[in-house]
Image (tube, coloured by chain):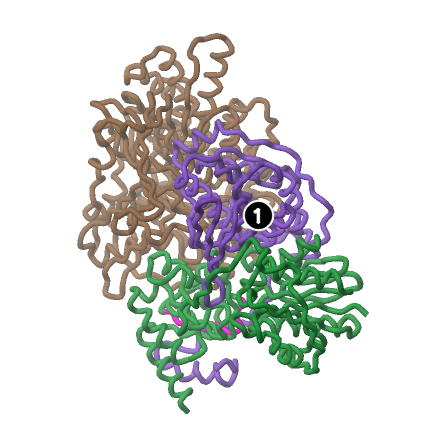
Chain colours: A green, B brown, C purple
Amino acid sequence: MAAIFAFAESRDGALRKVALETVTAARRAADATGGGEVHAMVLGGPGIADAAEALGRAGADVVFTVEDAALARYSPEVAAATAAAAIADGDYRAAFFPASAEGRDLAPRVAAALDRSLLADVTEFTFEGDDVVASHPAYAGKAVATLRLSGAPALLSVRPGAVTAVEAPRTPRVEARPPALAPAEARVVVTGLVARGAARLDLAEAPVVVAGGRGLRAAEHFGLVEALADAIGDAAVGATRAVTDDGWRDPADQIGQTGRVVSPDLYIAVGISGAIQHLAGMRSSRVIVAINRDKDAPIFKVADYGIVGDLFDVVPRLTEEIRKLRAG
Amino acid sequence: MSFVPARHQPPLPLERLIRSEPPDAEALEMDVLFVGAGPAGLAGAIELARLVAADREQGGGLGEVSIGVLEKAGALGEHSLSGAVVNPRVFRELFPDVPEDQLPFRQRVDREAVYYLTAWRAWRLPTPPTMGNHGNWAASLCEVVRWMGERAEAMGVNLFPGFPADALLVDGQTVRGVRTTPVGLTRDGGTGSDFLPTTDLTARVTVLTEGVRGTLGQAWRAWQGVGSPNPQIFALGVKEVWEVPRPLDRVVHTLGWPLPRDVFGGTWLYPMGPSQVSLGLVAGLDYRPAGLDVHRLMQRMKQHPLFREVLEGGTLVEWGAKSIPEGGYYSLPDRLSGDGLLLAGDTAGFVDVPSLKGIHYAMQSGVLAARAIFDALKAGDCSAGRLAAYDRAVRASWIVDDLRRTRNMRLAFKDGFVRGGIKAGLMTLTGGAVPGGRIPMHEDAEAARVPDGAEPFTPDNVLTFSKLDANYKSGNATRDTIPSHLIVGEDVPAEVAAFYARLCPAGVYEQTPEGTLRVNPPNCVDCKATDVLGPRWTPREGGSGPQYRVM
Amino acid sequence: MKIAVCIKRVPDTEMRFTIAADGKSVDPTGLKYEMSTFDEYAVEVALRLNEQHGPGDVTVVGLGPDGVGEILRKALSMGVDRGVHLTAPEVPFDGRVVAGALAEALTGQGYDLILFGRNATDTGAGVVGAMTAGRLGLPCVTAVSHLEIANGRGTARRELEGATETVEFPLPAVLTIDEGIARGRIPSLKGIMAAKKKPIDTREASLGAPAIVVDRLAPPPDRPPGRIVGEGPDAVPELVALLRDEAKVL
């Protein structure tokens, strides 16, 4: 019986949330194709093998651990060669990668090494005989492409958050593997990793995003947005293109067609009118809240809940109410 | 309390628009430059390229002639808007190798109807002779312009979309070329990271084909003191293109509702192939009620059964607005040429209101300009004296023939619709001879406005839309941080602020709850209506404004 | 440096987006096409590198139908030296096939750098750059947001979730360019004139058989209609209650 491969992403010696999502996706694929095994692979520095237990809880039957001091940081060429070798050596129906920053880098490398096509950044998938049929948001979120990939192993990368990690506990067989490429041989070397804005969650990861637009009128008023994010706790702060263009926020905070695409559980748009290029970056959020003084603003068309009013009155009140809720 | 818009209108900034300074050392040298890639500029460029090529073949000795066409829109056709039902006669002459059914038109006009509307009814009228459209074609001017641009480029014409002309460069009385607008200015006028400075272009002849209410055309006429028997008068048209479930089988024009009785104008509904229609509403800018809002009237119009029936189940594809020069014969400039300069197309006012046509006149004026320029280049003399051949050619052409025949028809309506209708009928019968003479007109901005209450309007976002949502459908993606290109008078009184807010179809002007005027320059779609009646429009960064695709 | 930049012609779907009657492609009526945003950044990076490091040569490579010529011409008017148009009736959705055709055109040309945009703004897959690198056997860094080149080596920065990574690599290499590094310059009139005289080499793309096909293209699922909870700060308690009890996100 063919198995399913899952690449478990780690950083700084710990699994990332997407690693469990990837294993859950693989588990689902295995169950859909006759209940074969899920083989997860994790690379990292010494001690990364400890991640095997968590991967087993998420549904991995086998965990390949690739421990090497030189792999404490992501090594794209080593990871690609090692994952590709494992997939080539095994009998896999499909291989799953996260469509995270690292996964988007890794998956096409693996695909190239195997000379296979890649279903990139998918949000849903089903197996139909020899084919995998997957959904991929395209055209800046204006359409969903249903793509059909034939043959095995099928390579897929799954958009973070598209699959919710669930437990499917088992005790995995742990198998240590050497890197398929000696780290010293790698041409591309990651020499540094610096956390950015450590206090705040990253946009792509945070379950809640609070974003501010032109309605804030000045850079210093972003304090209101920051305070609301602080009150919520696990929230990241984003901004519209207009705001980053004006230099009120770092361009890395921009949500939109040319910026970050986010799909948190809760998205709060503060003083954002809802330009289509911004909507492209956030419309797949699960719940959208809009606060804007213009009741005709397009943002209200995509918002699940809206408050029409002056954000300078509404946002402090919301911050206060959420603080109360959190305290109670 | 009535008010006169002209009292609140700032003057044209002549010192900016007419620059008596030499082109900079880096200037791009052209032989002939058309300012504006609309039907006039492109027809002119194509005809000139054709003449030059023929001359070369025949060993005429003129040699290479570089022809440039500047266009303020980011891509060709994106600022072009017309009804449009096109008379194809100039296309036949300019493109004899292209069969008529392969010209860039949507469909031939087979059937037409004119209605007088009341709020609920539509009364079919006999089609006035001036409005007959048999043999004409329904078209999108954007598509026509894009197609003409491809033809021009294939003939070696240099097209420069995204480069508005900001000023005429003059030397004495002679126009030497133009200066383009800079790109990437920050709101306070500083230079941002994407800054692209101005470029000077020199030309032996500059042809202003800027379209309606061209800024450089106005400036040149003011500078040269070129008047006209009557001032130019204007109308504002708002247009939408809809995707509809069933094709429309006829060209429709209407008079009457929803326009107030004392406002000159009408509406149209044209088929655009199997699944699209074009519709719009036009109102003369000499209207009295200060609360008149052409965009809102257009939205109301769609609620009439005549329109609703066609639009039901459809979706709005595109929205746009544009002014129309309506003065006709008596508003033509006394002079269309000067040293190194010609005026053509809407900039010169070649529009015939009774037949609702301008495109073929614009093209023909471009063709005539090209011929005069060709002769001038051959003679090595681009002075006003030599280029005056263009004036004579226009005066002797069917353009002026047509406009003379209908010379008073639009003007007759200045006293209201019923009296105007009777007079217009007489004129048609007598080929323009009765009532004879010239009906004198004021500038639109001189017409006093009477403040009135506005009917409440709540768009349903299915059939009717707010200005902001409509503006989105113009494709307007102007950089938000652009400096304002609008010159607004100081201390605008509340009633005038309200008037601007209603007048502007694009939501550029808003009245604050305190009564003051708020200006949102990036919303501007270059319709020029407020340039006629209020704040001045000036050229801004290339590619700003609407991005029409099927207007 | 000798640099190639692979650029894609994509529809500008910001204003108009209609799915064609076949249910698997975009209706081209009234659509405008442009160079994919990140590709434009890549062109700019190439131009700046050669401005910094002395004279060089930049080639843009585009794959697709006739209209690709327009975006190649735009790149030439930005300052690129030459263009290669690999003709194909359409661009396949399967990036492996595209990478194969590009690699064939790029191989053995002695490029110091081959640049791509991070991903095309239409398909949004972001696989062609790394796959092309794989085909060519060249080192690859994706989603580069900052770049320095010195002595035949490069240092790049990549933006990860919540962190910034520094990557070193030898030349020749393939890079895909993210935002934040450079926005595309606006072609000057002189640039547009100069572009008319620059060469575009046109030849047929050698596309293999795709393994990925588009079954369907559909609008994203409708969201349930939202509602205005109320006006002003007094609506806040109800909003919080709804987020907690109905939406269950607090």
To which quarter of the image does residue C47 belong?
top left
Image side of residue A53 versus residue B550, left or right:
right
Asked if residue A290 lies in the magenta stretch, the reply is: yes
Where residue C111 appears, as percent x and y from the top left, is 54, 39
**Looking at the image, which residue is at 25% across and 22% down?**
B174
Provide the residue designation for mark 1: B276
**Looking at the image, which residue is at 67% across and 79% down?**
A56
Where residue B166 appears, as percent x and y from the top left, is 30, 36
Secondary structure found at label 1: strand
Image side of residue B371 versus residue B181, left or right:
right
The chain that hosts pointer 1 is B
Dot 1 crowding, Cα within 10 Å, few <14, some 14–19, many 20+: many
Asked if residue A150 lies in the magenta stretch, the reply is: no
**Looking at the image, which residue is at 52% across and 46% down?**
C171
Secondary structure predominantly adopted by residues drawn in magenta? strand
Amino acid type shown at disc 1: Gln
Q: Nearer the viewer, residue C240 or A129?
A: A129
Image side of residue B165 versus residue A262, left or right:
left
